[in-house]
Image: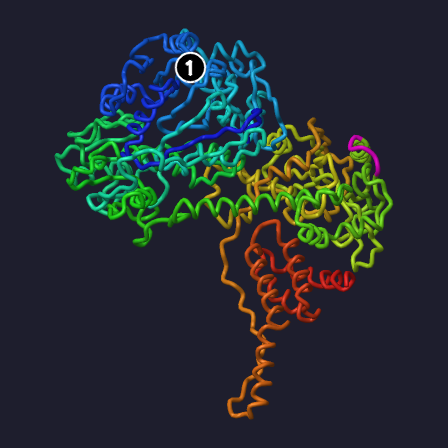
Amino acid sequence: MSSIPSTSSIVISYINGICGAGKTYAIAAWADRLAKVGHKIILIQPTTQLIHETIQATFPAMKVDMELVTAITSQTHPCKVIQTITNHLETTDPEKGEILIITHSAFFALPSHLFYGKKWMLAVDEIPPVERSFGLNIPDTHELLTRHLEVTDRTHPEYWRIGAKDVSAIRKIAANKRGDEVYEKFRGFADSVVSPHWSVYVNAQNYERLIAETDVNGVARQLVGHAFMAPTVFEPFKAVYIAGACFEESLLFILWSNLTNPKVPVEFKDVSSSFKLYRRSHDNGDLLDIHYGVDQPWSKSVRDKVVERVDGTTGSVLDAIREKAKEMVGSKLIAEFKNADIKKPFFENCERLPNVTHGLNVYQHIDHAFLMSALNPPPAHFAFLKRYADVEPEVVQTAMFRQAMYQAANRTSIRDPRNLNPKMWFVPDSQTAYWLQSMYPGSRVHDLGLFDGPISKNNGKAGRPKVHSNSTARKQAQRARERHTKDTILERLIRLDVVNGLETRNNNLNRTKGDEIIACMMEPKNIGLTSLDRTTFQGTFFADKFSKEGLPFEGSFDDLVALYRDFSEQEFENKEGLSAYSPSMYVANNGAETSRGYDNIAYVRNIILDFDGGDLTPEDFSALFPGWRMVFHSSWSHTEAKPKWRVIVPTEHLIDIENYKLVAAYIMERLSMAGWWTEKELNQKPSRRDPAKFSGVHGFDVTKLNPACVLFVPAKRPDSFFMEVPGTALDLYGLVRDIPVPPLAAAVAPTVVAKPTVPVVNDNAAPPLKAIQAKLSEEALNGAAAKQAERVKKALDEWAAVAMLPGMGNTEFNRLAWRLKAAALSDHEIEQTLCQEASKARHPSERRAEIKNILRCLRKAA
């Protein structure tokens, strides 16, 4: 994720306590104790309101020596906060203990050098955000910002790293000292770009269109940005403590626990037990009733949607929930937590909670809460966190939306264990309601029963169940997902190594597993049967589309393009006179029954796709993959009225069969993400034609998304065209790392394998014979048959767990065969088992078609 360098390990100690546990009080006592013996403590809190409460109430309650305390906020030093903090840090006596208290925003605006070498200890009250999202719709004014930016890393296929080309200009925008309203729109993004602790990325295709100032279906001319904060921000400190509720469900913990940069090692230590907290769990859940309105994820669009209610009236979803809550609460005081865009109070007798509520204790006189804020990040940011950082949307919603609800609700009387009044909370959706219930054992969840149709309870069910029952289960699932991701990516890389002549990566895997991967590949045998210099291979040409043997083309991609251009300028009498091209190197006489099928492929170079009629144009397609070099040419039957064309994308390396299909499938997925679909996909799900998201029919022939496809070369025709798009060849090693790994398959019922027959002991037999029978029975139970059955069962269970995963069927089915062979099954038994197990695959017919070749490979290996 982050590429910010670091030279030492960063240790973060955390205090994980519930809301109202007294974490701030515990930190106050800890800071006072250390400051009195000469330590320098900097305490940062989210808001000036919380700092004021800490100074006025928390510190006096814990008998903190106020002569050791210095608070610098916008209240104490208006308009000079950063300068005053800087002056204090530069002039403070390094030998004198003190507690400096400032806001989160002020702390993160300070240059790190102020803390180096001064032995400060940092206490962070409440978990700071470590990610940001930006959406700037600036198609006509972008140059005010983008002329000062540059792309510093284009290696990821979807997200580009952004840096400052003119640092002083970006700093000016970030500072915005004169309050310029246009600069204010750019300020957050500019601040992230110039910060040494933030890595900033943009959606590549949107940024490319924005800079090029051209419109393409499915790609908005916007700056869609994302940023990660690196843990290096805490590097200068002698010790770092962070106190926060649900710490292990925070994005800080999740993102920093999974940093991919080895130069930023982060070690988390749970020190909660070392601090004296008032309570470790909520024991007053029996006082709480939680009511929800809808059984689907909450957002502003759902909030404002006008629907028919069960009573026949029509109105927005939010109004329906509000009216029901008002009916139930009556004239009692209620706290409101809502988005900033809603100014008007919902209730006559209410108090509005601030947008950042952490730590505040001044609302404990209120029993009831109406919690309707929609705090989800934009959909593009959900996608970024999933695709770039492998964080599931459900995890993001809990870390951002549900925890904000939890913090807000806990400003009310539920915070006071002495308050025994009944409490009602009104929340938007069922999943949030049940998540809150898990925090308050004994509380009750109720559906308000307001809606029928798409926004309603799901036949009385409580929405989707929790993904994980507790944090331990979540960690176990995360570790399993990490292992699965690591193994899958390593297998992709091994396959590339094999066809590129680099077979040493096998040493990084368990040797047996690496050998299994290579043994399941068809390519190594064929590579051994060809003496061609594979580094210059660019594909194979055939005299016509039906020729069984072709001529490998050697040279550079530029040479291939020149040849294709020559073809495009030649006229032919008919289509049958055209030569044909395939990106694969075939070994025709290798003993296989085919001459240019999968069994004959040694390796592949370049990706070729066949557009057979649809709405997508070459310009549209190239815009979706900015930075990729491409060559387009019309096909024989192309006309302006019914366009048909092909595109070749060069690859920097050779590619194997499975990775070729993986890359082709990834391209199709990127098309669907931009609203491009096949007719079949649209018929399967008509809602994909929603005008807000639908771009058109992409028109690619999905039956030819494989390296064995053979396609005619171009020719000069009435409406023909030939077009090159500049860019770079695909870095396959980077691409297969970045293509998302499919999730682990859900657990499946274990396959039942018949136990071996055991000789029966006859109780009426003579003692010597009975003893012999008992001995034989024992040997049978513990003998080879039992072990064989166990090995077969394990192989079948492992196959069932991955059989439906996209892009893995061929590999895993071959692996199953080898494991059955290792379990000493006969060829007939293996064949019967494979025929039966093929039905569990994502594409059963493809698996069944492979069985004959698999058996032949097994026999040859034997």
Q: Residue at x 29, y 48 (%)?
A: 452
235 is within the stretch colored magenta: no
Q: How many marks?
A: 1
Q: Quadrant of residue 396?
A: top left
Q: 673 left or right of 578?
A: left
Q: Quadrant of residue 502?
A: top right
Q: Which kind of residue does numbered mark 1 sit on?
A: Glu
Where disc 1 sits, the SS reads helix
Q: Position of residue 623 (x, y in %)?
A: 60, 30
Q: Which residue is more in the foreground, 358 or 112?
A: 112
Q: Position of residue 326 (x, y in %)?
A: 18, 37
Q: Residue at x 57, y 85 (%)?
A: 771
Q: Residue at x 23, y 44 (%)?
A: 285
Q: Position of residue 21 (x, y in %)?
A: 28, 35
Q: 833 left or right of 404?
A: right
Residue stretch in magenta: 554-558
User: In the rendered image, is residue 227 in sight?
Assistant: no
